[in-house]
Image: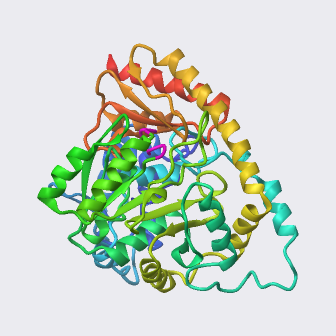
Amino acid sequence: MLDIDWRPDRSSPTQLHLQIAGYIKNKISCGEWIVGTKLPSQRTLSDIFDVNRSTIVAAMEELAAEGVIEGNSGGGTVIINDTWTLFPMERAYNWNNYISSGAHQSNQNIIQLINQAEFDPGIIRLGSCEPSPKMIPYGMIQKILKGLPETANFLGYEEPRGSIYLRKEICKYLDTMGIAAEPSSILITSGALQALQLISLGLLHSSSVVYLEKPSYLYSLRTFQSFGMQLSGISIEEEGINIQELFARHRRKRGSMLFTIPTFHNPTGTVMSLERRKALLEKCEMERLPVIEDDVYREIWFDEQPPMPLKALDKNGLVLYVGGMSKNLSPGLRIGWIVGPEQVIGRLADIKMQSDYGSSSLSQYVAAEMFASGLYAEHNKLMRENVRIRRDTALTALNRYFKGIASWNIPAGGYFIWLRLNDGISMYQLFVKALKNKILIHPGDLYEYHSSQYIRISYSNASLDEIDFGIKVLSQLVIEQLK
């Protein structure tokens, strides 16, 4: 996806289509857009530049006439860069073969648009799964930083598994939820996403089948697919993943691992019951099916604590437990962890050292001090109170604006409401229209292919007023499409 943050100047005497053509030529002449680059569709360019489609057509005709671009049947419009007027001295180097041969797949187009839009200061983020800046405990973190010992080295490398100080504190923290772990069985990662990347690289092979709930946020990532792995979706029920369906599938496919989010599932908000957790783990042990448990939303509960993690029930080292601080403390610290058998953790630690030679030492110290000082527990209590208010604001807005056209869950924790429209619509069109109105959403087809009725509403980042206004405008856009 090309990074375009420019708009034509409507007050300029130069016609809009000529401004757009000039902008594209400038990008090419600077070497930023290379030979073989495929331009976005005319519809997408029309949205990006905020002009009529006829203006885009005129700009493309101008560039084609100058020999800058070429339209291929079924292949879109491509930069061919064979005009002497752009490059009088030499041709720009063609990097396209290298880009297309990289092992890691590109994000979906809509994910790239989301990633760009999240940094627009005027956007209402109803899709983000990170805490609002107002909920990040800057004061607590500054207090820790001001108390840094002068004699200690917090700017050097840590050992392969991560800071021993932090790993000891995580052991104490895990013990409060029933997980018995030693520092040697913990690896510090740069967030939970890196944990999944390390597992992909270190424990799975290119033909592996990974089971997961359907829908699941993992469908929106390229982590497993980039390494040639297959995702196999299993339906999710009110109490959690459908165990019967999972093992009926497993008898046919013989998958390598199960990835699950049993606590405040992303995107549905489902909490797997304790009985379902016990039954799932018992069956996985019988079938020798390893489990990746993603538990990053555990601390964001409202009325009662969720059931103990699968890892707390694991007596045979079958579960790799992934936790972190990005969702409830600070995404910028980039602190996560994997808990598992020592041999597995040693393997993953070796790969991490090959990848980045360790997570930030300073971030690890801050995280350890948050645990040791009791500030982490204090912050989580305040976080839960603030997030609950945001959830209630979102539910009130949904009752006011979506009643009769949709249904939704009432989250017991986490950041998400899984909104189901009564009738299907074009999710891409809704996404684009919402973005034009400065509202960022996550359409349901990011989490389940071909879904035309679901939207993931997040209440973690936007202000209370923004939540109400954003849901109001979103309902209007939905109603327009339903007509």
Tell me the quarter of the image containing the N terminus: bottom left
Q: Is residue 2 left or right of residue 250?
A: right
Q: Identify the residue shown where x is 55% and y is 79%.
A: 184
Q: Is residue 117 left or right of residue 31?
A: right
Residue sitting nearer the eye, 110 or 454: 454
Q: Is residue 280 left or right of residue 262?
A: left
Q: Identify the residue shown where x is 60% and y is 57%.
A: 326
Residue 368 at what x, y percent from top left?
A: 71, 68
Q: Which residues, given as a range, are shown in magenta?
A: 263-270
Residue 68 visible, this angle? no
Q: Identify the residue shown where x is 43% and y is 43%.
A: 274
Residue sitting nearer the eye, 277 or 44: 277
Task: Residue at the far left: name it.
Answer: 252
Residue 465, quarter of the rendered image: top right
Residue 94 at what x, y percent from top left?
A: 33, 78
Q: Is residue 328 inside the magenta stretch? A: no
